[in-house]
Amino acid sequence: MAELVVRGGDWSALTRNVDRPRHAAIEAAAALRGRRATLPPALVIRAILTWLPALVPLDLRTYARIHFTRHARQTHDMLRAWAGVAGPGGQAAALRELADELALALEQSTHG
């Protein structure tokens, strides 16, 4: 859900932009488990994110925005650690990019 924080808590923007977090999840699994993860295609993830708020008995969009923004520093540290396990180079490009964008969002929220 780092992407949700990067997108300013905008669930619709998250739903439209699932490629980077999907690739980051694949990279994290490869770094931690030593093998590539199998994730649903982006189209399926978009569909899940579109329909999920209607299926849960709470305002999921608001809850996720508040919860994951509150824990964004912890999420950032976790992304950095996973990228570190992956090692240097392009094996964790999406993880590093997402961590960088999350750091920028955290900095902006602190100073803005």
Image: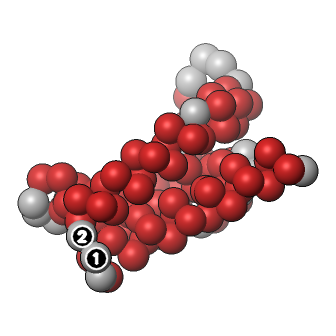
Residue drawn at 80 percent across, 55 percent down: 108
Residue drawn at 44 percent across, 68 percent down: 96
Q: Nearer the viewer, residue 14 or 42?
A: 14
Say if residue 109 shows up in the picture: yes
Left or right: residue 111 compared with residue 70: right
Please say if the residues under marks 2 and 1 sit with CB atoms less than 8 Å apart: yes
Q: Name the residue under label 1.
A: 88
Q: Nearer the viewer, residue 81 or 13?
A: 81
57 vs 109: above or below? above
Residue 90 in the image, given as x and y percentages of width and height = 31, 82
20 vs 14: above or below? below
- The quadrant in which residue 13 appears is bottom right
Residue drawn at 19 percent across, 62 percent down: 30
> Gap between marks 2 and 1, in whole Å?
4 Å
Q: Name the residue under label 2.
A: 87
Q: Which of 51 and 90 is in front in this view?
A: 90
Residue drawn at 62 percent across, 57 percent down: 103
13 vs 67: above or below? below
